[in-house]
Image: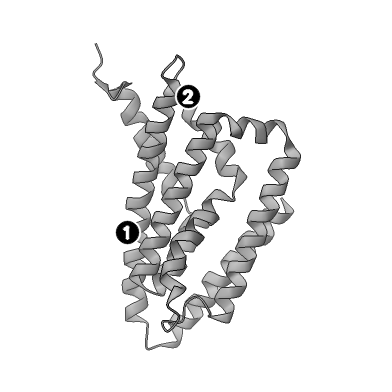
């Protein structure tokens, strides 16, 4: 008999972890946002990473409650959220170009990174729909399916936090190395431009 871990078969848990890691390693808006924040400091980068992971928990909750199914059934609702998310990414890109958030003299820069990280992930309906398709296949059916989905979502969030924290710390070291050069400012512009581009792409899809 296959061993059980928190009500899940060990083979299922390992398969889910492998699939989750592969997906987490795929570059996307979350990774780009953490990279940009990490260049401006370790605290900003790590807090944004944990913000993204918290957004994953939000989507797990939606999938568990079935709200993601509603977004799939009502395209207008998903589209509205998509536009809000696109507008927010564009806003973050503009702020980055203005260099307001990343000025070390601005006390709210690092503290606001967690909240912004949550919103970057939470305002992406594609993540909600992805979790709707991804979690049930591993959680299975039955009265405990919701609890298993919550557990798998929490595992995904932990793996996300670990990976993105590593991205943030690596980005911070790079930022320190380049702090006295023009390259740091150029990379900041690249990060800002990437967020603007992602916002535009999300808006027109």
Q: Position of residue 3 (x, y in %)?
A: 23, 18
Q: Is residue 130 visible?
A: yes
Q: Position of residue 109 (x, y in %)?
A: 45, 73
Distance Cα–Cα, label 1 vs label 2: 29 Å
User: Residue, x 34% and y 45% (percent of image)?
Assistant: 158
Label 1 CA crowd tier, 10 Å (few <14, some 14–19, many 20+): some
Left or right side of 113 for 15: left
* SS label for mark 1: helix
Q: Is residue 133 visible?
A: no
Residue 198, quarter of the rendered image:
bottom right
User: Residue, x 52% and y 51% (percent of image)?
Assistant: 121
Which residue is at the far top? 1
| Screen quadrant of the N terminus | top left
The tally of labels here is: 2
| Colour scheme shown | one colour
**CB atoms of marks 1 and 2 within 8 Å:** no
Q: On the image, numbered disc 1 is attached to which residue? A: 166
Q: On the image, numbered disc 2 is attached to which residue? A: 137
Q: Earlier in the sequence, mark 1 or mark 2?
A: 2
* SS label for mark 2: helix
Left or right side of 71 for 29: left
Q: Position of residue 157 (x, y in %)?
A: 39, 44
Residue in front for this viewpoint, 104 or 192: 104
The answer to whether residue 53 is above or below residue 69 is: below
Q: Position of residue 119 (x, y in %)?
A: 54, 55
The answer to whether residue 101 is above or below residue 165 is: below
Label 2 CA crowd tier, 10 Å (few <14, some 14–19, many 20+): few
User: Residue, x 54% and y 56% (percent of image)?
Assistant: 120
């Amino acid at each position: 008999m296959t061993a059980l871990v928190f009500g899940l078969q060990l083979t299922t848990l390992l398969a889910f972890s492998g699939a989750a890691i592969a997906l987490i390693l795929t570059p996307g808006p979350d990774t780009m946002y953490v990279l940009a924040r990490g260049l401006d400091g370790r605290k900003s980068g790590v807090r944004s990473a944990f913000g993204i992971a918290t957004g994953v928990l939000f989507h797990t909750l939606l999938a568990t409650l079935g709200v993601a199914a509603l977004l799939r059934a009502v395209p207008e609702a998903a589209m509205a959220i998509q536009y809000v998310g696109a507008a927010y990414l564009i806003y973050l890109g503009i702020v980055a170009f203005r260099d307001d958030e990343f000025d070390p003299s601005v006390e709210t820069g690092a503290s606001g990174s967690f909240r912004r990280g949550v919103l970057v992930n939470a305002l992406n309906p594609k993540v909600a729909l992805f979790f709707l398709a991804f979690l049930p296949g591993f959680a299975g059916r039955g009265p405990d399916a919701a609890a298993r989905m919550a557990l798998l979502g929490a595992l995904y969030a932990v793996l996300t936090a670990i990976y993105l924290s590593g991205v943030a710390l690596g980005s911070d070291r790079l930022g320190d190395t380049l702090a006295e050069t023009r390259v740091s400012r150029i990379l900041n512009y690249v990060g800002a431009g990437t967020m603007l581009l992602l916002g535009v792409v999300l808006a027109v899809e």
